[in-house]
Image: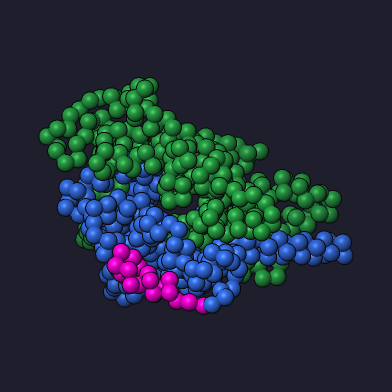
Amino acid sequence: MQLSLEAKRRRTKRIIKDQMSAYAFLSPYLIIFSVFFIFPFFYGLVISFFDWNLFYPDETKFIGFDNYQRIWFESGGIYYRYFWSGLKNTLIFVVFSVPFLVLIPLILAALIDNEPKGYKIFRTILFMPTVLSISSVILIWKWQFYTNGGFINSVLLKLGLNEIPFLVSQPWAWISIIAVTIWWTMGTNMVILGAGLKNIDKTLYEAAAIDGASYIQTFKYITMPSLAPQMLIVMITTVLASFGVYGQPDLLTNGGPDFSTTVLMMRIRPLAFGTNANPGIATAMAVSMGMIMIVVSIIQARIIKRRGDA
Amino acid sequence: MAIRSVQNKRKTISFIALLLISILWLMPLVWGLATSFKTPQDISSNPTSLFPELWTLEHYQGLFSRPDTPVMRWMLNSFIIAGSYTVLYLIIVSFAAYAFSILKFKYRDQLFWIILSTTMIPTVINLVPLITMTIDLGWFGSWLSLIIPGLGGVFGMFLLRQFFLGIPYELVESAKIDGLNNFGIFVKIVMPLSKSAFLVAALFAFMGNWNDYLWPLIQFSGVDASMWTLPVGLSKIAGTYNYDYGLTMAAAILAIVPVVIVYALLQDKIIEGVARTGIK
């Protein structure tokens, strides 16, 4: 098609005008996103190389990898102890919470997918705790666990059993934290996995049933491969969320007994701000934790993708 | 038929299992509700009973009369903060989503995918820098810290963009021929067609902000209790009134009831929104 010079010019003008208006729509978001998401990330990397003083900027000085050196290798140092014990406790939580936070929602989603009577009501009830805030969840749960007149122990006493000191002894402190986490958060995974199950072509199941496949076989060869995209999202988001755990141990056990549930975020927070703050150390811990999280996510994505292809 | 009967059996088993689990899931809430209406004597002598011997409002009255537990004030604060955040967030992300879906500009999709990929960066790294930044901006301890930094959140923007992509482009074309500019198209064509997507984005923005705990806890560390949000206030009640079971349950129930009502009304939209995050 031949365009006159005038028409060409007009078209160029319109394209430029369109671009300008697109940037006008985009700019508020881009500005806030860059200032409060992108910039802090790089700023954080910078802070981790400084002995940073929040209130007397003159006293802030560059110290290279010293912060990392102190938390990773300087055994005997307090920050070394904070970092490694915090990381260990976080990993305990990740390892023991994630399987339940994936398996229980998967089972519930499968039950709901059978569409028994009232399945929508059940889904509504089971999802509900996810909309509550962590502090109201803990208020409700904290004294379910108490020894002195708490609900669970009162039931145990009635049944003639011994009381269990849930929040002040191990492994009960972890069991309590993980139970509350399951109650509070599993609904999200249940709904995501449920959406995946609903998408599976039901004629595949009928064909498998005619071929005489067992429930387990059907699950292994039809359900799981079809669920791979949802599994990927659920696994990665659940692991990342579990690494970031803070509210449950902070409010339920206050990190106890004997700091055994003091997770890494609970070490980072007082170092980030407060009377004992050391922002350089806090960010070095955060960056180290972030790197571990990224590596774990990549490994998971690889494994699940490979399984999905096979 | 054999398959039919297997299916029926499966449905029955599923029903029974879901019923039992749902009862288990509701128990802490129902029992907390009952406790909040029991007298202290009743709480200590019949901790497991679901029905108060004598219904009392004393814990709720105690909560309202104590100067250090202004639950309604906290609720109002949370409502104002989460509400302002949600309104601003919807404006900002819907503009961006519009640019990323219907408008055309160079490197549009590349830029979008770059932004989306940053969600892989763990936000824990941003914690200390954001504290420093809010101090430098003079926002530390104020509500601005709870409203502004989160406005760049990706989830709502992504959700709206995906929805806008489904709007037939012919509608946009014909509006252009009718002489509408881009802003007019956004307000008159795109927005009315996307009410449900806006609602889902609003719900998630509101819930996320309303429930936030760690960030407001840091911001309010030296701030008067009358400025706090509900989660921060409740966490203080949990710490201070540990063994006053009636009072803590009353506080929890007050905090939970409005959320559960909103949830009950809009649960279809909420569940649909979550389900959609798992499907590309």
Q: Is residue B72 in sight in this rendering?
A: no
Q: Is residue A129 in sight in this rendering?
A: yes
Please check the rendered image and state whether residue B69 is part of the magenta-colored stretch, yes or no.
yes
Q: In terms of depth relative to the viewer, which is nearer, A99 or B70?
A: B70
Rendered residue at 28%/24% (across/down): A66
Q: In terms of depth relative to the viewer, which is nearer, A228 or A173?
A: A173
* A261 to the left or right of A189: left
Say which quadrant the N terminus of chain A sits in. bottom left
**Which stretch is magenta?**
B55-78
* Residue positioned most to the right: B1
Rendered residue at 31%/76% (across/down): B178
* B177 to the left or right of B196: left
Question: Residue B66's spot in the image, x, y percent?
Answer: 32, 68
| Image mark count | 0
Q: In this view, does B257 lie above or below B106?
A: below
Question: Residue B181's spot in the image, x, y percent?
Answer: 27, 70
Specify the chain shown as blue: B
Q: In terms of depth relative to the viewer, which is nearer, A167 or B230?
A: A167
Main secondary structure of the magenta stretch: helix
Please check the rendered image and state whether residue B107 is part of the magenta-colored stretch, yes or no.
no
Tell me which corner region of the image, top left, top right, bottom left or bottom right, holds residue A80.
Answer: top left
Question: Residue A227's spot in the image, x, y percent?
Answer: 62, 50
Say which quadrant the C terminus of chain A sits in. top right
Rendered residue at 50%/72% (across/down): B39
Query: Which hue is chain A drawn in?
Result: green
Q: In this view, does A40 lie above or below B31?
A: above
